[in-house]
Image (tube, rainbow, N blue to C red):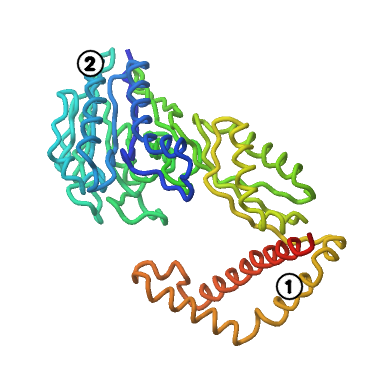
Amino acid sequence: MPFRFVHTADLHLDSPIASLALRNPELADLVRGATRRTLERIVDLAIAERVDALLVAGDLYDGSQTSMATALFLVAQMRRLETAGIGVYIIRGNHDAQSQITRELTFPANVHVFDGRGKPVRAGALANGRDVFVHGISFGQPHAPASLLPGFRAPVADAINIGMLHTSLAGSGRHDNYAPASVAELVAHGFDYWALGHIHQRAVHSERPLIVMPGIPQGRDINEGGNKSVTLVTVGDHGALLAEEHFLAIAALERVTVDLAGVEDWPSMLTRVRVGLEQVKEGARADHLVCRLTLSGPTPLAFRLRRDDDLLAAELQAIAEGVGGCWIESVELSLDRVVPPQARQEIGALPELSAIIEREVLPSHAFQAELRDVLSGLVSQLPREVRDLLGADEEGEAALLALAAERGIAEVLPRLAAVHDGEAS
């Protein structure tokens, strides 16, 4: 019989799924419980597949705010695995190290939480009698700027060796240094499988040995898009390893852009959005799709879409409901202004006003100085550590101001058109 296990990490239990527009109570309920329901599905998978073990490579929790209710829920899931005869192996990640409950919680007997000493634990054996050992090192503090790899012991001779490490690897630009280690160093250590955690995007870094970063099983914000999964690993009688993805997320969070180029009327716009949402939903490996929708491209509808944003939001949500299992978190407009000749006559001097603003007002010294004063006032009220978000240097500041001015025109002129339409009627 082979040895089989599920490898996951970064569940961040009860971490709120960030959203700009959770005004819909049903959607709020959906995302609030998504991390718990995903863990339930992971346990369901482990039981259904009759695996020998579940490996959790760090960040079960989401920091110091973890509640006792979260901990009790976790224990209940571990007891389900205990009843099924499945061992659980856990290392603490940087978020777990912040939680007092992590240290105080008493797990069932089937759960082994590794400490910082790297002592291997026998997890089972293959049909030919070859033992399987799991090695792991937990974070003791929220930060681990040095490699933990020297703390791991050598592979157990004549056995299958599985290592568990919560790490940013080496040179991952989007992540701070957490227990950094290069793929080459992991390969050289001699384990058969490395069960990694910390980086939320799945990646297979090596086939021999098999080194897997499973990614987060349930995305928490729109920047954690894409299909999320856990990894089911089978160790054959001769030591060959096979890794399979299983998609268990409750909700997929995606940025969806719909190009409205060539669309000239409202019904055609809605049709194009519906087709776009259906395509993305079809490819989503989750029950629900929560999307941030961007409408882009040149269209004569640009004025109306900006002006009638309340109507637009209502109609787009109706489209999403018709798709089924689809939710629109927010709508962004990135539209080029296309004004047909007939429309120019209807809105009088507005096109000329727009040209004057772009030609004479925006480049003027007085306008630029006023913009910089507004930005300086805003920056002065922010904590120092986040001020770079509004421009880390002069070029960044100039680009931000130019974007703000452009969007300001795009917002104001349609509203002037709306006033004109009201007076004309």
Spot occupied by residue 156 in the image (x, y as percentages of width and height): 20, 30
The residue lying toward the viewer, choosing from 219 and 22, is: 22
**Lower sequence index among marks 2 and 1:** 2
Residue topped by disc 1: 354
Packing grade of label 2 (10 A; few <14, some 14-19, many >=20) is few
Q: Examine the rendering and report whether any part of residue 51 can be seen.
A: yes
Judge left or right: residue 134 versus residue 256.
left
Is residue 74 placed above or below 405 in the rendered structure? above
Q: Nearer the viewer, mark 2 or mark 1?
A: 1
Disc marking residue 83: 2
Quarter of the rendering occupied by the C terminus? bottom right
Judge left or right: residue 158 versus residue 212.
left
Spot occupied by residue 332 in the image (x, y as percentages of width and height): 59, 53
Residue in view at x 22 percent, y 52 percent: 142
User: Label 2 vs label 1: CA separation?
Assistant: 70 Å
Is residue 248 placed above or below 152 in the rendered structure? above
Residue in view at x 44 percent, y 27 percent: 246
The residue lying toward the viewer, choosing from 178 and 72, is: 72
Amino acid type for the residue under numbered disc 1: Ser
> Under tag 1, what secondary structure?
helix
Is residue 417 placed above or below 206 in the rendered structure? below
Disc marking residue 327: none
Is residue 339 placed above or below 20 in the rendered structure? below
Amino acid type for the residue under numbered disc 2: Thr
Q: Quadrant of residue 398?
A: bottom right
